Amino acid sequence: MALVKICGVESARDVDLLRDCGVDLVGVWCGVAGGPRDLPVGRAAALVARAAAAPGCRPVLVTTLADERRLRDVVARTGARWVQLHGWQPPALVRRLKAEPGLTVVKVLHVREGSCPEQRLVPAYERAGTDLFLLDALAPDGRVGSTGSPVGVAAALAVADRCTRPFLLAGGISAANRAAHDAVVAHPLYRGVDVDGAARDDRGRLDARRVGELLRAWRPGPARPAAAPAR
Ligand SMILES: O=C(O)c1ccccc1NCC(=O)[C@H](O)[C@H](O)COP(=O)(O)O
């Protein structure tokens, strides 16, 4: 079954809302310079622990940190077992992180105007041990993350075809644009979606109705029982 990741929890209320909706992956930002939902490490650790305690829910530390020492420190202090490297970390850093047993590394591959600047590095990221790629839009001005812009089906397929590891798709994903992504969903390496903007209400708060719509669109089938062991 496809995974749905919702990004940018800021409070216990947010984690509980995503847990109650049955979301699979809960994005906790720490070390996202200038990120509107970036958290100090202590608060990130508390939300990682809260999400990890929810059956079927996995916390994902989302970070743009590229300094190994700081990154390892944040991973250790938050207790996260999944790390999403957003930004421009090199394959060598993935390799060093993967030396830590039990750590799942998600590497973002950015896509701008149909092309992926890191495409030639995909084999190196794979050799380094990347578990999962996340294809996300890069804004024309260079902004990464929560751009609300789509990667585009043709571009996503072109990048996916260069990968041998599975991928999640991000970038302007909503319940309404699920049908337009049939070809991506049918790709053998597709594993799900990552959403920020479309999961929020007009005030920017995570919204149970919108999250429910996303889940029904992108992870159809019976809702996961609250206590199901999905790890
Ligand atoms: O959101 C940011 O500002 C951000 C900055 C730096 C790194 C990551 C960031 N966002 C995290 C995400 O993975 C988003 O969920 C993803 O970009 C999708 O966002 P959206 O297009 O709003 O659905």
Image: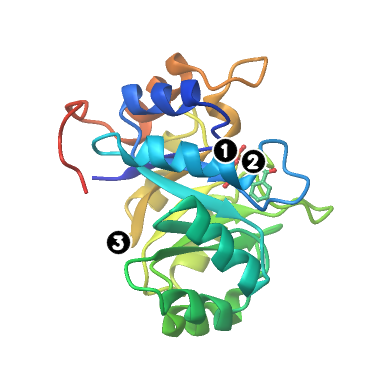
Q: Position of residue 201 (x, y in %)?
A: 59, 16
User: Real-space Cα distance between discs 2 and 3?
Assistant: 35 Å
Name which of mark 3 and mark 1 comes first in the sequence.
1
Q: Which residue appears at 61% of the width and 55% of the height?
A: 63
Q: Which residue appears at 48% of the width and 83% of the height?
A: 123
For label 3, the crowd category at 10 Å Cα-Cα, with few meaning under 14, some 14 to 19 and many 20 or more, is: few
Asked whether residue 84 appears in the rendered view, the answer is no
For label 2, the crowd category at 10 Å Cα-Cα, with few meaning under 14, some 14 to 19 and many 20 or more, is: many
Quarter for ligand 1?
A: top right
Does label 3 point to a residue whose CB lies under 8 Å from ligand 1? no
User: Real-space Cα distance between discs 3 and 1?
Assistant: 37 Å
Q: Where is residue 193 in the image (x, y as percent from the top left)?
A: 43, 44
Tag 2–tag 1 contact (CB < 8 Å): yes
Instruction: Name the residue nearer the viewer: 160 or 193.
Output: 193
Q: Where is residue 42 in the image (x, y as percent from the top left)?
A: 57, 43
Pair 2/3: label in front: 2
Residue 147 against residue 76 in the figure, above or below: above
Identify the element where label 3 is drawn: loop
Q: What residue type is labelled 2?
A: Leu
Find residue 39 and name its label.
Answer: 2
Find residue 24 and name its label.
Answer: none
Q: What residue type is labelled 1?
A: Arg
Find residue 43 and name its label.
Answer: 1
Q: Which residue appears at 33% of the width and 44% of the height?
A: 3
Mark 3 — residue?
Answer: 188
Residue 50 against residue 161 in the figure, above or below: above
Identify the element where label 1 is drawn: helix
- Judged left or right of residue 79, residue 146 is right
User: Real-space Cα distance between discs 2 and 1?
Assistant: 6 Å
